[in-house]
Amino acid sequence: MKIVPFSLKEGSKKEWKDVFNNPRPVKVESFKTGTVTLNMRGTINPKHPNAGNVEDEDVDVPIMAHLVHHDDLGDYLLDAGLDASYCNDPRGNVKGILSWIFTDEYQQEKDENIAYHLNKRGTKLKGVFLSHLHSDHMAGIRELPHDIHYVIGKGEKCLESKPFHYGGYFKGLEALHEIDFSTVELMPPLGPAADVLGDGSLWAIYTPGHTPGHMSFLVNGLDGPVLYTIDACFIRKNLECGVASSGYTWNVEMAQKSLENILEFLKEYPEVRVVCGHEDPE
């Protein structure tokens, strides 16, 4: 499978206030595609001075995917969630002699998989923006169309190594399209942000730390802007205490910086609604 550049138009807006003054005909519907168990001492970095007393306890949180509908430009997914294989197998049919070590386990009820949600609505996808390449955000690719663009941030890596660990997430895809955030506008206080549909409606924002190429997303709709942090901020408590994750994270210091950028952004633009990575806004 090839990695090719994602083609971006030059953004016409340089500041978020100008973006928000020009809302676009775009709405989002969010789908729960399963459940994952997180430990709070991995979700909230217990070593951060603002963390307080983080209990060693497990919490069940939803695995989400978000459908962006643009009246003029069509339908796009923010993350793919889980496919139907997790309903009967918590490892999602991942194969390989080391799959029992490297494969996360999830829970899924019948008719929670991403294809069910999309087929029920008659959705014809034009593309999928993947925040990062962890299985709870990309496994649904296996039951989605292959003749559309799948977009990642530059630097993302996926653990797919036959015969040791193989989920077949990209089987049938010819290419992944990659956003090079070194070439896009800096949009303070968030940092590099790409106007991915070209009209100011949907922005991919570089929020590294959880993974090297992690992306968050901002939807600039007529009902007001909404920031989807994805795993730059797992749950609401990350926002409340200002502490990023640790145990599930590639670079803890970088993850903390990305969260602090988000907090500064939300302080500067209080009109922005925020949806954390593992919360259901419905």
Image (cartoon, rainbow, N blue to C red):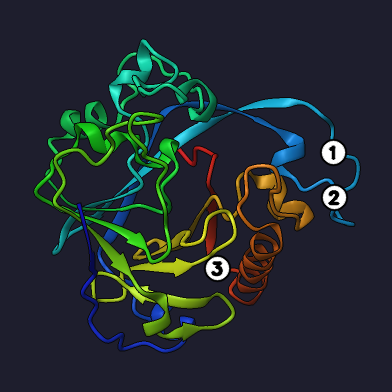
Residue at 34%, 31% in the rendered image: 166
Report the amino acid beneath label 2.
Answer: Ala
Disc 1 vs disc 3: Cβ atoms closer than 8 Å?
no
Q: Is residue 19 above or below residue 120?
A: below
Secondary element at image label 1: loop
Residue at 53%, 65% in the rendered image: 207
Report the residue marked by disc 1. Answer: 54
1 or 3: tag closer to the N-terminus: 1
Q: Residue furthest left?
A: 147
Q: Is residue 251 above or below residue 16?
A: above
Report the amino acid beneath label 3.
Answer: Glu
Secondary element at image label 3: loop
Q: Could you say where residue 42 lies in the image, as x and y percent from the top left? A: 71, 40
**In this view of the protein, can residue 11 be seen by the observer?**
yes
Task: Using the image, tell me which numbered label, if any, was put on residue 51.
Answer: 2
Q: Is residue 158 above or below residue 224?
A: above
Report the residue marked by disc 3. Answer: 271
Disc 1 vs disc 2: Cβ atoms closer than 8 Å?
yes
CA gap, disc 2 and disc 3: 26 Å
Q: Could you say where residue 163 lies in the image, as x and y percent from the top left? A: 34, 29
Crowding around mark 3 (Cα neighbors within 10 Å: few <14, some 14 to 19, many 20+) is: few
